[in-house]
Image (spheres, rainbow, N blue to C red):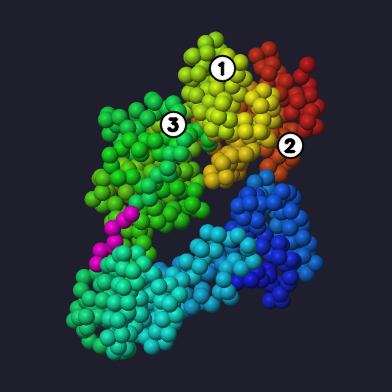
Amino acid sequence: MIFGILGPVEVRLPDGSPIAAGGPGARALLALLLLDAGHIVPTERLIDGLYGEDPPAGAANALQSHVSRLRRGLRAHGGDGELVEFHAMGYRVAVDPEAVDAHRFERLARGGRAAPAAGEHASATALLGEAIGLWRGPAPADVPFAGARATRLEELRVAATEDHIEAQIAIGALRGVIPELRVLVEAHPLRERPRGLLMRALHGTGRQAEALEVYEDLRRVLADELGADPSPEPAAVHVAVLRGEIPGLRGPGAPSAPPPAPEPALPGPVFTPPPGRLTGFVGREAELARLTGSGTAARLLTLTGPGGAGKTRLAIEAAARTADEVCFVDLTRAADDAALVHVVASALGIREAGGVTASAAEVDPGARIVSVLAGHRLLLILDNCEHVVGAAAELAHLVLDECPGVRILATGREPLGITGEVLCPVPELALPDPDADLDALRAAPAIELFAARAAAVRPNFAVTAETAPEVARICTALDGLPLAIELAAARLRTLPLTEIAARLDDRFRLLSRGSRTAAPRHRTLHAVVEWSRDLLDPDERALARRFTVFTGGATLAAVAAVRRVRGRGRRPAGRTHREVVDHPRGRGRRPIPDVGDDPRVRRGAAGRSGRGGADPACARGLLHGSGRRGGRGSARTGSARAVAEAAGSPSTVR
């Protein structure tokens, strides 16, 4: 099936026959899913796109109804209704992005933008013309609250149009682009690149006076609207017109001209600052001292720890205590390794070039980043590296080699793994001793965090002799994990403290309402676990599934027994059990097998594999090993017996 969202939603069968996707709600839902074709779209994002910031009561049920109608509509007209999949985090449309016009447009636009660097202006013209031709109207037209997604697509369309016009100017096709440029200038009066292109086209056709008038009009508009002057790019074109040059013109119609003036440097960067500190910072004195102390000479520090441990918050606090410039890069915006350099470039304020450009810097995004950072004393924060760790390591190595004034502070669930890296583990917050008095209990960082966040939603809340036992119980049950503590404290808005403590056995349901502006993977405790699981490769997931037979941790020998049971003594491909237990994704206050402590995490690890439960062979192997150990393995034996019975494996341990 072929899908179109660059205009009204359009669905076609492979033979080109159109089919109806359903009513307005189903079409809007399909467009939202196709914007992230092949990826899970969180339920919250779908509801926001359908209903805006004030969704009606029952919006989740209405979303399910739209999904059902969309599936029925696709099936009724010969399509595949099973393309729309349900997942724990949301929904996914299982189609190749190349089957969606918006994703084809982006691929063609990228190719067309890169072609001029190799001198292939005719190829750029063809690619960009094909990309622009995919548009049939505003996009996504059927989504009531598209917001930033619609703005992004429109920005890409305008940029591709500018690239297309510039490629045509480069091959000497001047007269045909002038009317299109006038329309573009009128639609975007504050956009400077179309003005520069129009000046070049007018001057190339012998209309120098009109070209100069375009610049004067730009200068007046910017002064009146923004109190600013034109940027270096259109100013350089203006100078070239005054000198009788035609910058960038090739092919027939280009008069002889003196050698072009040196290309101007790229505009100075405007670094993205760290997010604002909207809440107080609790604990972490030792980690902060290590990050900001005068004795820290390392140029690459990596904060590692489990999801929700507070790595990003610690990095932001450290940035506030440095005298150097700071640039904050949120790598969750990078969908894959290839996108990382573009996300970093955007955070560094590197603009897409227009008019007369520094073309050498456009060829290699990494070289462009280095050229901007050279000469700066800067703390570069690479936040959330875990899903693009390979590309992050390569870029960090390049920057550290070429830019001696730059320090890098990375955060992630595993190290970058390059020479010179210094690791700073971020553990859970310290808990009070069981016999601590009230003052000592209040001073424990985990309790202090709960009290601060609880007071934000219930102003009169305080840790008193009456509330202290329940607060300590909650923080201890949550292992001092900052995100979990904050989610629990937020529930005080609607639940009494005793009710929160009583519901901790079902913590995933309890801790399911985080900040609406937080990253999706930090809005709920379940999302944190889901993000961690998605980072595992197939072998790691298989081993995590086998860990679900344990309920209270395991020795390395027991893990080894589970690891080799399916291979009957032969070690499977992939990580060894030692490597996975030592792997930073599994590090925390306790070893990775303790994922089995919560039944819902265990079901997630076991069931998401497609098996629907624990591995019977794994359970039998564990029972066999537990029997040999006699009394030392009673807890494990009980766990193995329960798993074996659930999996249909007869228990032989007495």
Q: Is 81 on the left-hand or right-hand side of 206?
A: right
Q: Position of residue 538 (x, y in %)?
A: 60, 43
Residue at x-position 51% and y-position 16%: 441
Q: Position of residue 576 (x, y in %)?
A: 55, 34
Residue type at the position of mark 3: Phe
Residue 50 can be seen in this image: yes
Which of the 4 image quadrants contains residue 180? Answer: bottom left
Quadrant of the image containing the C terminus: top right
SS state under label 2: loop
Q: Residues within 10 Å of mark 2 (few under 14, many from 20)?
A: many
Which of the 4 image quadrants contains residue 461? Answer: top right
Quadrant of the image containing the N terminus: bottom right
Q: Which mark is residue 464?
A: 1
Q: Which mark is residue 438?
A: none
Residue at x-position 74% and y-position 40%: 612
Q: Position of residue 440 (x, y in %)?
A: 48, 14
User: Which residue is disc 3 drawn over?
Assistant: 281
Which of the 4 image quadrants contains residue 71? Answer: bottom right
Closer to viewer: mark 2 or mark 1 = 1
User: Mark 3 touching mark 1, by CB under 8 A?
Assistant: no
Q: Is residue 441 above or below residue 366?
A: above
Q: Residues within 10 Å of mark 1 (few under 14, many from 20)?
A: few
Q: Is residue 286 above or below residue 86?
A: above
Closer to viewer: mark 2 or mark 3 = 3
Q: Is 177 on the left-hand or right-hand side of 508?
A: left
Separation of marks 3 and 1 at Cα, in angstroms: 22 Å
Magenta part of the chain: 264-270
Residue type at the position of mark 2: Gly
User: Which residue is disc 2 drawn over?
Assistant: 613
Separation of marks 2 and 3 at Cα, in angstroms: 41 Å
Q: Position of residue 381 (x, y in %)?
A: 38, 43
Residue type at the position of mark 1: Thr
